[in-house]
Image: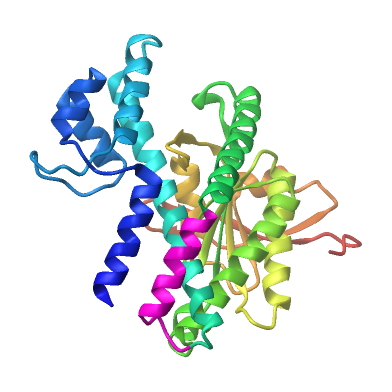
Protein backbone atom coordinates (compact mmCIF):
# COMPACT_ATOMS: atom_id res chain seq x y z
CA UNK A 1 0.00 0.00 0.00
CA UNK A 2 2.82 2.40 0.89
CA UNK A 3 4.49 1.69 -2.44
CA UNK A 4 1.23 2.37 -4.27
CA UNK A 5 0.77 5.70 -2.49
CA UNK A 6 4.39 6.68 -3.08
CA UNK A 7 3.93 5.91 -6.76
CA UNK A 8 0.73 7.94 -6.94
CA UNK A 9 2.40 10.91 -5.23
CA UNK A 10 5.35 10.68 -7.61
CA UNK A 11 2.96 10.68 -10.57
CA UNK A 12 1.26 13.85 -9.29
CA UNK A 13 4.68 15.46 -8.80
CA UNK A 14 5.70 14.59 -12.34
CA UNK A 15 2.45 15.89 -13.79
CA UNK A 16 2.92 19.16 -11.93
CA UNK A 17 6.65 19.70 -12.37
CA UNK A 18 8.01 17.22 -14.88
CA UNK A 19 10.63 14.55 -14.10
CA UNK A 20 13.38 15.48 -11.62
CA UNK A 21 16.64 15.52 -13.56
CA UNK A 22 18.94 18.32 -12.43
CA UNK A 23 20.99 19.46 -9.48
CA UNK A 24 20.65 23.04 -8.27
CA UNK A 25 23.99 23.96 -9.83
CA UNK A 26 22.91 22.58 -13.20
CA UNK A 27 19.62 24.47 -13.42
CA UNK A 28 21.23 27.66 -12.07
CA UNK A 29 23.96 27.48 -14.71
CA UNK A 30 21.43 26.81 -17.48
CA UNK A 31 19.37 29.82 -16.36
CA UNK A 32 22.42 32.06 -16.00
CA UNK A 33 21.82 32.77 -12.32
CA UNK A 34 24.14 32.39 -9.33
CA UNK A 35 23.80 29.14 -7.39
CA UNK A 36 23.62 30.98 -4.07
CA UNK A 37 20.74 33.15 -5.33
CA UNK A 38 18.91 30.00 -6.47
CA UNK A 39 19.46 28.54 -3.00
CA UNK A 40 18.04 31.65 -1.32
CA UNK A 41 14.99 31.58 -3.59
CA UNK A 42 14.36 27.92 -2.73
CA UNK A 43 14.63 28.67 0.97
CA UNK A 44 12.45 31.78 0.60
CA UNK A 45 9.71 29.67 -0.97
CA UNK A 46 9.72 27.60 2.21
CA UNK A 47 11.25 24.34 0.99
CA UNK A 48 13.75 22.32 3.06
CA UNK A 49 17.43 22.19 2.08
CA UNK A 50 18.54 19.67 -0.54
CA UNK A 51 21.99 18.19 -1.04
CA UNK A 52 24.16 19.78 -3.72
CA UNK A 53 24.28 16.54 -5.71
CA UNK A 54 20.55 15.73 -5.38
CA UNK A 55 18.72 15.58 -8.71
CA UNK A 56 15.37 16.94 -7.52
CA UNK A 57 14.88 19.85 -9.90
CA UNK A 58 12.97 19.75 -13.18
CA UNK A 59 12.93 21.87 -16.30
CA UNK A 60 9.98 23.76 -14.75
CA UNK A 61 12.29 24.92 -11.95
CA UNK A 62 14.76 26.07 -14.59
CA UNK A 63 12.04 28.05 -16.39
CA UNK A 64 11.30 29.95 -13.18
CA UNK A 65 14.97 30.81 -12.75
CA UNK A 66 15.09 32.11 -16.31
CA UNK A 67 12.17 34.40 -15.46
CA UNK A 68 13.99 35.57 -12.31
CA UNK A 69 17.08 36.34 -14.37
CA UNK A 70 14.92 38.46 -16.68
CA UNK A 71 13.68 40.43 -13.66
CA UNK A 72 17.26 40.97 -12.54
CA UNK A 73 18.79 41.85 -15.92
CA UNK A 74 16.01 43.44 -17.94
CA UNK A 75 13.88 45.07 -15.25
CA UNK A 76 16.64 45.97 -12.81
CA UNK A 77 14.86 44.25 -9.93
CA UNK A 78 17.15 44.01 -6.86
CA UNK A 79 18.12 40.45 -5.93
CA UNK A 80 16.93 40.97 -2.35
CA UNK A 81 13.47 41.91 -3.63
CA UNK A 82 13.11 38.66 -5.57
CA UNK A 83 13.93 36.69 -2.41
CA UNK A 84 11.49 38.75 -0.36
CA UNK A 85 8.73 38.18 -2.91
CA UNK A 86 9.55 34.46 -2.96
CA UNK A 87 9.03 34.42 0.80
CA UNK A 88 5.59 36.05 0.51
CA UNK A 89 4.51 33.76 -2.34
CA UNK A 90 5.81 30.69 -0.56
CA UNK A 91 3.94 31.46 2.66
CA UNK A 92 0.66 32.14 0.86
CA UNK A 93 0.75 29.21 -1.53
CA UNK A 94 1.92 26.75 1.11
CA UNK A 95 -1.30 27.47 2.96
CA UNK A 96 -3.32 27.15 -0.25
CA UNK A 97 -1.71 23.79 -1.05
CA UNK A 98 -2.17 22.42 2.47
CA UNK A 99 -5.82 23.50 2.50
CA UNK A 100 -6.48 21.91 -0.90
CA UNK A 101 -4.86 18.59 0.02
CA UNK A 102 -6.59 18.45 3.42
CA UNK A 103 -10.01 19.29 1.99
CA UNK A 104 -9.62 16.77 -0.84
CA UNK A 105 -8.60 14.03 1.60
CA UNK A 106 -11.52 14.85 3.92
CA UNK A 107 -13.88 14.61 0.97
CA UNK A 108 -12.40 11.25 -0.04
CA UNK A 109 -12.83 9.94 3.50
CA UNK A 110 -16.43 11.18 3.62
CA UNK A 111 -17.22 9.40 0.35
CA UNK A 112 -15.92 6.19 1.89
CA UNK A 113 -18.32 6.50 4.79
CA UNK A 114 -15.98 8.29 7.21
CA UNK A 115 -13.85 5.19 7.77
CA UNK A 116 -10.68 7.25 8.20
CA UNK A 117 -7.72 8.19 6.04
CA UNK A 118 -6.73 4.68 4.96
CA UNK A 119 -4.67 3.85 1.92
CA UNK A 120 -7.63 3.76 -0.46
CA UNK A 121 -8.84 7.19 0.69
CA UNK A 122 -5.34 8.64 0.29
CA UNK A 123 -5.02 7.17 -3.18
CA UNK A 124 -8.44 8.58 -4.14
CA UNK A 125 -7.40 11.99 -2.83
CA UNK A 126 -4.24 11.97 -4.94
CA UNK A 127 -6.24 11.04 -8.03
CA UNK A 128 -8.68 13.87 -7.32
CA UNK A 129 -5.84 16.38 -6.89
CA UNK A 130 -4.39 15.33 -10.22
CA UNK A 131 -7.78 15.75 -11.90
CA UNK A 132 -8.27 19.20 -10.32
CA UNK A 133 -4.97 20.64 -11.53
CA UNK A 134 -6.05 22.56 -14.67
CA UNK A 135 -9.17 24.05 -13.07
CA UNK A 136 -7.54 24.89 -9.75
CA UNK A 137 -4.47 26.43 -11.36
CA UNK A 138 -6.70 28.71 -13.44
CA UNK A 139 -8.67 29.68 -10.35
CA UNK A 140 -5.52 30.58 -8.38
CA UNK A 141 -4.18 32.64 -11.30
CA UNK A 142 -7.44 34.58 -11.61
CA UNK A 143 -7.71 35.16 -7.85
CA UNK A 144 -4.12 36.49 -7.81
CA UNK A 145 -4.93 38.92 -10.62
CA UNK A 146 -8.05 40.11 -8.81
CA UNK A 147 -6.10 40.68 -5.61
CA UNK A 148 -3.40 42.48 -7.60
CA UNK A 149 -6.03 44.91 -8.90
CA UNK A 150 -7.33 45.46 -5.36
CA UNK A 151 -3.81 46.12 -4.09
CA UNK A 152 -3.20 48.67 -6.86
CA UNK A 153 -6.43 50.45 -5.92
CA UNK A 154 -5.28 50.64 -2.29
CA UNK A 155 -1.90 51.91 -3.42
CA UNK A 156 -3.56 54.69 -5.43
CA UNK A 157 -5.38 55.80 -2.27
CA UNK A 158 -2.19 55.78 -0.16
CA UNK A 159 0.85 56.01 -2.47
CA UNK A 160 3.48 55.92 0.30
CA UNK A 161 3.76 53.65 3.31
CA UNK A 162 4.16 56.72 5.52
CA UNK A 163 0.83 58.05 4.25
CA UNK A 164 -1.05 54.87 5.10
CA UNK A 165 -3.48 55.61 7.91
CA UNK A 166 -6.28 53.19 8.62
CA UNK A 167 -8.40 51.41 11.20
CA UNK A 168 -6.92 48.20 12.58
CA UNK A 169 -9.24 45.77 14.31
CA UNK A 170 -8.80 42.46 16.08
CA UNK A 171 -11.61 40.07 16.92
CA UNK A 172 -11.22 36.87 18.89
CA UNK A 173 -13.64 34.38 20.32
CA UNK A 174 -13.97 34.51 24.11
CA UNK A 175 -13.57 31.12 25.75
CA UNK A 176 -12.62 29.36 22.54
CA UNK A 177 -9.74 27.39 24.08
CA UNK A 178 -11.89 25.49 26.61
CA UNK A 179 -14.55 25.03 23.94
CA UNK A 180 -12.02 23.49 21.54
CA UNK A 181 -11.05 20.89 24.14
CA UNK A 182 -14.61 19.58 24.15
CA UNK A 183 -14.81 19.27 20.34
CA UNK A 184 -13.56 16.48 18.13
CA UNK A 185 -11.39 17.37 15.13
CA UNK A 186 -14.31 17.62 12.68
CA UNK A 187 -16.32 19.83 15.04
CA UNK A 188 -13.31 22.05 15.72
CA UNK A 189 -12.66 22.47 11.99
CA UNK A 190 -16.32 23.35 11.47
CA UNK A 191 -16.18 25.95 14.27
CA UNK A 192 -13.06 27.61 12.82
CA UNK A 193 -14.63 27.57 9.36
CA UNK A 194 -17.78 29.22 10.72
CA UNK A 195 -15.71 31.83 12.57
CA UNK A 196 -13.85 32.76 9.38
CA UNK A 197 -17.02 32.77 7.26
CA UNK A 198 -18.70 35.28 9.61
CA UNK A 199 -15.56 37.42 9.63
CA UNK A 200 -15.29 37.57 5.85
CA UNK A 201 -18.99 38.26 5.42
CA UNK A 202 -19.06 41.31 7.69
CA UNK A 203 -15.55 42.68 7.12
CA UNK A 204 -15.78 42.60 3.33
CA UNK A 205 -19.45 43.59 3.41
CA UNK A 206 -18.52 46.67 5.44
CA UNK A 207 -15.82 47.75 3.01
CA UNK A 208 -12.87 46.43 5.03
CA UNK A 209 -10.12 43.94 4.33
CA UNK A 210 -9.13 40.76 6.13
CA UNK A 211 -5.41 41.03 6.86
CA UNK A 212 -4.99 37.57 8.38
CA UNK A 213 -6.64 34.93 10.52
CA UNK A 214 -4.87 33.03 13.27
CA UNK A 215 -7.03 30.28 14.74
CA UNK A 216 -9.83 32.01 16.62
CA UNK A 217 -8.58 35.54 15.91
CA UNK A 218 -8.96 37.75 12.84
CA UNK A 219 -7.13 40.99 12.04
CA UNK A 220 -8.82 43.42 9.67
CA UNK A 221 -8.31 46.90 8.28
CA UNK A 222 -10.63 49.67 7.07
CA UNK A 223 -9.82 53.01 5.52
CA UNK A 224 -12.29 55.18 7.45
CA UNK A 225 -12.99 55.31 11.21
CA UNK A 226 -16.78 55.05 10.81
CA UNK A 227 -16.46 52.04 8.51
CA UNK A 228 -14.11 50.26 10.90
CA UNK A 229 -16.40 50.94 13.84
CA UNK A 230 -19.45 49.67 11.95
CA UNK A 231 -17.61 46.47 10.97
CA UNK A 232 -16.60 45.84 14.59
CA UNK A 233 -20.16 46.25 15.84
CA UNK A 234 -21.49 43.97 13.10
CA UNK A 235 -18.95 41.30 14.04
CA UNK A 236 -19.73 41.53 17.76
CA UNK A 237 -23.44 41.18 17.07
CA UNK A 238 -23.04 38.36 14.55
CA UNK A 239 -20.90 36.21 16.86
CA UNK A 240 -23.23 36.87 19.81
CA UNK A 241 -26.21 35.68 17.74
CA UNK A 242 -24.46 32.62 16.34
CA UNK A 243 -25.59 29.51 18.26
CA UNK A 244 -22.48 27.54 17.33
CA UNK A 245 -19.81 30.03 18.43
CA UNK A 246 -18.87 31.94 21.59
CA UNK A 247 -19.20 35.72 21.68
CA UNK A 248 -16.29 37.74 20.30
CA UNK A 249 -14.19 40.49 21.84
CA UNK A 250 -12.96 43.33 19.62
CA UNK A 251 -10.26 45.97 19.91
CA UNK A 252 -9.80 48.87 17.46
CA UNK A 253 -7.22 51.59 16.87
CA UNK A 254 -6.82 54.21 14.14
CA UNK A 255 -3.51 55.58 12.93
CA UNK A 256 -0.46 55.06 10.72
CA UNK A 257 0.65 51.57 9.76
CA UNK A 258 3.54 50.04 7.85
CA UNK A 259 2.73 47.53 5.11
CA UNK A 260 5.21 44.67 4.67
CA UNK A 261 4.86 41.30 2.95
CA UNK A 262 1.06 41.48 2.88
CA UNK A 263 0.83 42.28 6.60
CA UNK A 264 0.49 45.51 8.59
CA UNK A 265 2.73 46.58 11.46
CA UNK A 266 3.34 49.46 13.83
CA UNK A 267 2.08 51.03 17.07
CA UNK A 268 -1.51 51.21 15.79
CA UNK A 269 -1.54 47.44 15.25
CA UNK A 270 0.05 46.80 18.64
CA UNK A 271 -2.51 49.00 20.40
CA UNK A 272 -5.49 47.27 18.79
CA UNK A 273 -4.09 43.82 19.58
CA UNK A 274 -3.62 44.77 23.25
CA UNK A 275 -7.10 46.31 23.59
CA UNK A 276 -8.86 43.15 22.43
CA UNK A 277 -7.55 41.34 25.51
CA UNK A 278 -9.37 43.82 27.79
CA UNK A 279 -12.70 43.73 25.97
CA UNK A 280 -15.54 41.75 27.47
CA UNK A 281 -17.33 39.13 25.37
CA UNK A 282 -19.64 40.80 22.87
CA UNK A 283 -18.10 44.26 23.27
CA UNK A 284 -15.86 46.58 21.23
CA UNK A 285 -13.06 48.68 22.75
CA UNK A 286 -11.63 51.70 20.95
CA UNK A 287 -8.37 53.52 21.54
CA UNK A 288 -8.68 57.02 23.04
CA UNK A 289 -8.06 59.08 19.87
CA UNK A 290 -10.23 56.80 17.76
CA UNK A 291 -13.17 57.19 20.13
CA UNK A 292 -12.82 60.96 20.10
CA UNK A 293 -13.05 60.93 16.29
CA UNK A 294 -16.40 59.10 16.45
CA UNK A 295 -17.86 60.96 19.39
CA UNK A 296 -20.09 63.32 17.40
CA UNK A 297 -21.44 60.73 14.97
CA UNK A 298 -25.05 59.76 15.77
CA UNK A 299 -24.51 56.22 14.53
CA UNK A 300 -22.43 55.43 17.62
CA UNK A 301 -22.46 55.90 21.36
CA UNK A 302 -19.32 55.70 23.49
CA UNK A 303 -18.55 55.27 27.15
CA UNK A 304 -15.18 56.19 28.59
CA UNK A 305 -13.34 53.64 30.70
CA UNK A 306 -10.75 54.16 33.39
CA UNK A 307 -7.12 53.93 32.24
CA UNK A 308 -5.83 50.41 31.72
CA UNK A 309 -2.20 49.34 31.64
CA UNK A 310 -1.31 47.60 28.40
CA UNK A 311 1.80 45.46 28.10
CA UNK A 312 4.55 47.26 26.18
CA UNK A 313 2.43 50.39 25.82
CA UNK A 314 1.61 51.70 29.28
CA UNK A 315 -1.54 53.26 30.72
CA UNK A 316 -4.17 54.23 28.13
CA UNK A 317 -7.81 55.19 28.21
CA UNK A 318 -10.31 53.44 25.99
CA UNK A 319 -13.94 53.68 24.97
CA UNK A 320 -16.66 51.06 24.82
CA UNK A 321 -18.41 51.37 21.44
CA UNK A 322 -22.13 50.74 20.96
CA UNK A 323 -24.68 51.58 18.30
CA UNK A 324 -26.35 54.98 18.46
CA UNK A 325 -30.05 55.37 19.18
CA UNK A 326 -32.08 54.26 16.20
CA UNK A 327 -29.08 52.70 14.47
CA UNK A 328 -30.32 49.13 14.51
CA UNK A 329 -28.23 46.38 12.88
Judging depth in this view, the residue of 193 and 159 nearest the camera is: 193
Looking at the rendering, which quadrant does residue 121 occupy? Answer: bottom left
* Image position, residue 252 (x, y; %): 59, 53
Look at the magenta stretch and give its main secondary structure: helix
Judging depth in this view, the residue of 144 and 242 nearest the camera is: 144
Image check: 202 left or right of 120?
A: right
First to last magenta residue range: 115-132
Image check: 77 left or right of 228?
A: left
> Can residue 117 be found in the magenta stretch?
yes
Rendered residue at 83%/53% (across/down):
299
* Image position, residue 94 (x, y; %): 39, 51
Please, is residue 166 above or below residue 71 in the view? below
> Can residue 16 be found in the magenta stretch?
no
Judging depth in this view, the residue of 133 and 203 nearest the camera is: 133
Please, is residue 130 above or below residue 173 in the view? above
Colouring of the image: rainbow
Rendered residue at 42%/85% (across/down):
116
Please, is residue 250 above or below residue 263 in the view? below
* Image position, residue 238 (x, y; %): 72, 69
Instruction: Work out which quarter of the rendered image holds the C terminus and state it.
Output: bottom right
* Image position, residue 115 (x, y; %): 45, 89
Instruction: Work out which quarter of the rendered image holds the N terminus and state it.
Output: bottom left
Rendered residue at 50%/36% (across/down):
257
Q: In the rendered image, is residue 308 in sight?
A: no
Amino acid sequence: MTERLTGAAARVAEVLLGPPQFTRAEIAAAAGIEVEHARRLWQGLGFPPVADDARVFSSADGDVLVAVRALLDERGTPEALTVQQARVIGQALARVADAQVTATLDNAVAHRGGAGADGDALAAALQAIEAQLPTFEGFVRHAWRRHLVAAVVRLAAAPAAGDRVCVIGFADLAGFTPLSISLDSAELAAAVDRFEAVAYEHILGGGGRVVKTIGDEVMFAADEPAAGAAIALALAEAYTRDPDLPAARLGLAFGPVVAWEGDLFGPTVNLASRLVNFARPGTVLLAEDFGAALHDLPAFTLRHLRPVKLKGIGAVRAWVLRRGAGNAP
